């Protein structure tokens, strides 16, 4: 006989309002949503039967109509410097990477929002892989859940290792708007991970219409992947710039940051430095000029080479010189240091190596479609 069972709804990526609607549809009270969020995202409980503040009948019902389905950690690698990298298998056979970087009291988790990316920035290994699909809200928040669980964080008084989240992994978060916004809500929610709005950062290469809407849905921090001080150069590095040029992008970013209720928030400008391409003193001066009316801090990222492009890493001298010019012009300009070298978790650099490993596992498993690369740690 044909199986006519209705697929169970995955509650893992549902925000509080969506869960409330779900419980109401079962004829239950809305406060069940709060109970469920705490069980899942604070205590790490995925078995409905163990949710003891719900009636037996409700638990039974939940296990019939719903599920809490996570992607699967295929590999976890720990670096001597404390960096932890997860290779996570998602439905369809693809894999994504999530990296945790500890820094003193701070623990930053870098999560992916898509499998691949359609925007094809010339220096980015993800872009070179093309686009596979959006991650679901469950797959995005699932990365946080899995990392938190690996640190024993998801229990009563568990250690709070993940203090910050950056959406700087694979994919363009603003092209997966609804799922990313839902996942951000779960990251920040007091009944879930409770991460402050000043510690969740969305990084974008500049999808202006989506950025224009972002402030209606969240108040997280914003990072703009600029990489060039003028349109001619940025057109070469970030093809999306031809559609939304620098002035339009910076205006949209300014509107977002100025629309936030708390003052003194700054936009992070990400600038990946590539040898002889965008690393000259005149570029630094032009950048200083460009950003003079924008509230920013600047993060300089040495380009990490990978097999498919001929770009080279910026020299240490050029990097220092670039930073000094910006600091002398009055900016906060930091250099993103390489972490997790020994486990291939370093920024961008892990690209080729991860791909090599994917290809090896592809031969072995015969099912891997694509693995990304974290460009942005
Ligand atoms: N799509 C979003 C977020 C993911 S990319 C965005 O573009 O902002 C996050 C960061 O990874 C980008 O700022 C980019 O600078 C960085 N990145 C990508 N490839 C890199 C590489 N090979 N070396 C260094 N940084 C890289
Ligand atoms: Fe996509 Fe960001 Fe890579 Fe550009 S830098 S291709 S937007 S992931």
Image: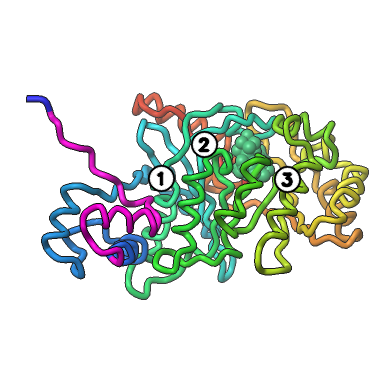
Q: Are marks 1 and 2 in contact (CB under 8 Å)?
A: no
Tell me the quadrant of ligand 1: top right
Q: Secondary structure at mark 1?
A: helix
Note whether 102 is above or below 10 in the view shown.
below
Q: Which residues are magenta?
A: 3-31
43 magenta-colored: no
Q: Are marks 2 and 3 in contact (CB under 8 Å)?
A: no
Identified at 18% across, 68% down, the residue is 52
Q: Which residue is mark 1?
A: 139
Q: Nearer the viewer, residue 223 or 357?
A: 223
Q: Which residue is mark 2?
A: 372
Q: Nearer the viewer, residue 60 or 316?
A: 60
Q: Which label sits in the foreground, 2 or 3? A: 2
- Tell me: 67 left or right of 162: left
Q: Quadrant of the N terminus?
A: top left
Percent of width and height locating residue 190: 44, 69
Task: Decide which of tag 2 and tag 3 comes sooner along the chain.
Answer: 3
Checking the image for residue 302, the label placed there is 3
Q: CA distance from mark 1 to mark 2?
A: 15 Å
Ligand 2 within 8 Å of the CB at mark 2:
no
Identified at 81% across, 55% down, the residue is 294
Ligand 1 within 8 Å of the CB at mark 1:
no
Give the class, few, some or many, for how many residues have Cα within 10 Å of label 2's Cα (few <14, many ≥20): many
Task: Decide which of tag 3 and tag 1 comes sooner along the chain.
Answer: 1
Task: Decide which of tag 1 and tag 2 comes sooner along the chain.
Answer: 1
Residue 36 in sight: yes
Identified at 51% across, 30% down, the residue is 356
- Tell me: 249 left or right of 190: right
Q: CA distance from mark 3 to mark 1?
A: 29 Å
21 magenta-colored: yes
């Amino acid at each position: 006989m044909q199986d006519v069972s209705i697929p169970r709804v995955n509650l893992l990526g549902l925000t509080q309002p969506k869960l409330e609607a779900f419980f109401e549809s079962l004829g239950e009270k809305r406060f069940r949503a709060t109970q469920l969020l705490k069980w899942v995202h604070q205590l790490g409980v995925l078995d409905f039967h163990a949710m003891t503040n719900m009636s037996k009948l409700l638990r039974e019902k939940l296990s019939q109509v719903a599920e809490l389905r996570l992607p699967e950690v295929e590999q976890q690698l720990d670096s001597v410097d404390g960096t932890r990298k997860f290779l996570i298998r998602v439905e369809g056979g693809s894999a994504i990477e999530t990296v945790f970087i500890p820094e003193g009291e701070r623990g930053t988790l870098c999560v992916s929002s898509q499998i691949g990316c359609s925007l094809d920035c010339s220096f980015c290994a993800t872009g070179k892989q093309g686009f596979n699909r959006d991650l679901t809200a469950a797959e995005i928040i699932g990365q946080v859940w899995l990392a938190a669980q690996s640190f024993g964080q998801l229990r009563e008084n568990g250690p709070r290792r993940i203090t910050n989240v950056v959406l700087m992994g694979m994919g363009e978060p603003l092209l997966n708007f609804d799922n990313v916004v839902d996942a951000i809500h779960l990251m920040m929610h007091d009944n879930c991970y409770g991460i402050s709005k000043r510690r969740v950062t969305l990084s974008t290469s500049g999808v202006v219409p989506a950025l224009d809407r972002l402030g209606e849905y969240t108040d997280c921090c914003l990072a703009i992947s600029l990489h060039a001080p003028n349109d001619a150069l940025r057109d070469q590095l970030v093809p999306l710039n031809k559609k939304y040029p620098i002035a339009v992008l910076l205006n949209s970013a300014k509107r977002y940051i100025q629309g936030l209720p708390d003052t003194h928030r700054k936009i992070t400008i990400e600038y990946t430095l590539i040898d002889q391409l965008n690393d000259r003193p005149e570029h630094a001066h032009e950048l200083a000029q460009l950003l003079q009316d924008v509230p920013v801090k600047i993060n300089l990222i040495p380009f990490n080479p990978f097999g498919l492009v001929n770009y080279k890493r910026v020299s240490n001298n050029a990097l220092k010189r670039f930073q000094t010019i910006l600091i002398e012009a009055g900016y906060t300009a930091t250099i993103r240091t390489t972490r997790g070298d020994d486990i291939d978790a370093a920024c961008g650099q892990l690209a080729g190596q991860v791909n090599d490993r994917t290809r090896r596992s592809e031969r072995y498993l015969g099912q891997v479609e694509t693995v990304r690369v974290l460009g942005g740690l």
